[in-house]
Image: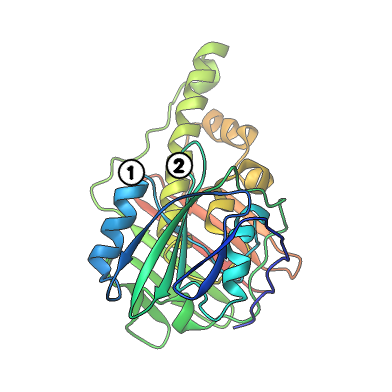
Amino acid sequence: MCLAAPAKQTSTKAARSGGAAYTSGSAKILGAVDSKAPFSGDRLFAVLDSVGGTGTWMEWDVNGVGDPSLMEVLDPMLKSDNKPEMVWVIVERQSPLVAVLLQKGRGEVIIFYELKNLDAKPMALEINKVLSPDVVFRDYEQISETEFVHRDKSNLKVVVTPKTIHFTYAMKGEEPLKMPTNFSSMTFVEKESVLRDFEDYFKYEYSLMLRAFIQSTRAVFNWQPWHWYLKEWNGKFMMSRAELEAILTRGIAPDSFTLFKAKTAQGETITLRTNGNGFSELIVSRP
């Protein structure tokens, strides 16, 4: 893999844990959980869930854009002999929460930090030049030369060709999205209500797609998982209200609704879409 060099930061707060230098920078250390032996998978996620509550932990990618406030915490560790084994972030709270897993003696320790914010400036979306299946599809099982299936969700699949990466996710039993047949004749207030309902629905569908596709893989894009949720990052790629209003005015549901579509500087296209009936997909196409 091609590893991006972390941004250089300075800090006035420094300490050591298990032989690894660490710093809080402008972050607040909330506490740590030690284990005399490496954490089992069940205990690891039990600890994370006990601290993170109902939020979703997103894995930090060393190849992705570095938020300066987060890199203040991680830089000293990345430069030490005891580099973080894994790093997770939760944003569904007043202040972002960070969990760093480090080796400590024969065991491990998870240190929790609270950041003031995640402060990276929006950057153009890119696909990493080197994609290793062992890294990207770590949570998937390869069942053929081109197809991978998620180990915990058999309805989440990926087909890889030299020109495309095609993720699909199917939820059976979903109620099909119902299109109003009289939208064009509604009053302004009625139209606003319908538009808000559809926008909320697609916002929820978009978040499900991010969890299924973006957060189940590693090191595909330069954006960190949380950047995909931020309006200042995704705004110009999302379905606009004008596009949604035009669809509602026609009164006929298209085969699929394109919720996100971006083109990289290298000519690659990234598309997230749903059919409004439990089926969604992410298509990455190379020129």
How far apart are the alpha carbons under marks 1 and 2?
8 Å
Residue at 47% from the left image edge and 40% from the top image edge: 202
Type of amino acid under label 1: Thr
Residue 206 placement (x, y as % from top left): 47, 47
Residue 170 placement (x, y as % from top left): 33, 57
Compared across the picture, whether 24 is left or right of 181 comes to right
- For label 2, the crowd category at 10 Å Cα-Cα, with few meaning under 14, some 14 to 19 and many 20 or more, is some
Q: How is the image coloured?
A: rainbow
For residue 150, which quarter of the picture? bottom left
Instruction: State if disc 2 and disc 1 touch (CB < 8 Å).
Output: yes
Residue at 53% from the left image edge and 12% from the top image edge: 189
Compared across the picture, whether 9 is left or right of 154 comes to right
Residue 215 placement (x, y as % from top left): 45, 61
Whether 39 is drawn above or below 173: the answer is below
Element assignment for label 2: loop
Residue at 34% from the left image edge and 55% from the top image edge: 48
Compared across the picture, whether 254 is left or right of 14 comes to left
**First in sequence: mark 1 vs mark 2:** 1
Nearest to the observer: residue 114 or residue 206: 114
For residue 63, which quarter of the picture? bottom right
Element assignment for label 1: loop
- For label 1, the crowd category at 10 Å Cα-Cα, with few meaning under 14, some 14 to 19 and many 20 or more, is few
Label ID, residue 54? 1
Label ID, residue 92? 2
Nearest to the observer: residue 260 or residue 245: 260
